[in-house]
Amino acid sequence: MKIFIQITFLTAFITLVSSCKKNEGPGGSSSIIGVLSTNLYNVSDSLIDTYPKANEDLFIIYGDGKSGYNDKITTSYDGSFKFDYLEKGKYTIYYYEDCATCPEGKQAKIIASEITKNKSTNDLGSVGVKKISNKGTSTINGTILVDNYNSTGVYVNSGIGADIDVYIIYGNSNLNYSDRIKSNYDGTFSFPNLANGPYTIYAYSKSLITADGLDVVKVTAVIDTKNTVSNVGNITINQ
């Protein structure tokens, strides 16, 4: 009987200890804090300003999970943030920032943090968020001209390219255009409010030799002074 009581007590004790063990997540007494700051870059990838990043979403993953975030908070007016009431364990904090070479124009920035004792605070310090500014005071303009061909590829005539889609890429990205406008009735186009840096402007032209029947006609320009107007001249496409 005594042995049975001891075994029963030991089993109950193990069960109690197991049930008291906490995993990563809420319910604890520790915190992860930091300050999010905007690092503002121009399209030439030069840092031009730094300031607190207010009202920015941050996400946290408990443990080693990768299927989705467990909680989300928003930074305060001064960029500060705090994930509170956390148990001991490993955590992943992430947020999104601008990326000139990423297909979506954004990328996730990941910070690993581990809480090793109760009633502790992990201070991540100042965390930078990259923002690429394409806003400025300069303008790039030009004119779309059209060479018209018949269905057999014989030249017919030339004219003004009215209502043609014109695209611009900020910086050196070759993945996606940054903005798109329509040429005016007289073929002219204008991209205003541009910051200093390199740009590529292009329009699509019909082609008889490419698989999709289209070709790209492009020009480049560099703005290196504020309040300037850069004219790229004529962009001639086939129709």
Image: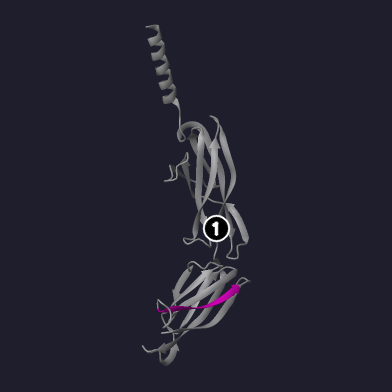
Question: Magenta includes 105?
Answer: no
Looking at the rendering, the stretch of residues picked out in magenta corresponds to 213-222
Q: Position of residue 40 (x, y in %)?
A: 58, 58
x and y percent of residue 1 in the render? 37, 6
- Residue at 55% x, 72% y is 199
Q: Which residue is mark 1?
A: 131
Q: Nearer the viewer, residue 156 or 7?
A: 7
Q: Nearer the viewer, residue 1 or 179?
A: 1
Residue at point 60%, 75% (across, down): 228
Q: Nearer the viewer, residue 26 or 181?
A: 26
What residue type is disc 1 on?
Lys
The mark tally for this picture is: 1
Q: Residue at x 61, y 70 (%)?
A: 226
The residue depicted at 55 percent of the width and 61 percent of the height is 132
Residue 165 x %, y %: 43, 76
Q: Is 216 inside the magenta-drawn segment?
A: yes
Q: Quadrant of the C terminus?
A: bottom left
In terms of secondary structure, what is the magenta stretch mainly? Answer: strand
Q: What secondary structure is marked by label 1?
A: strand
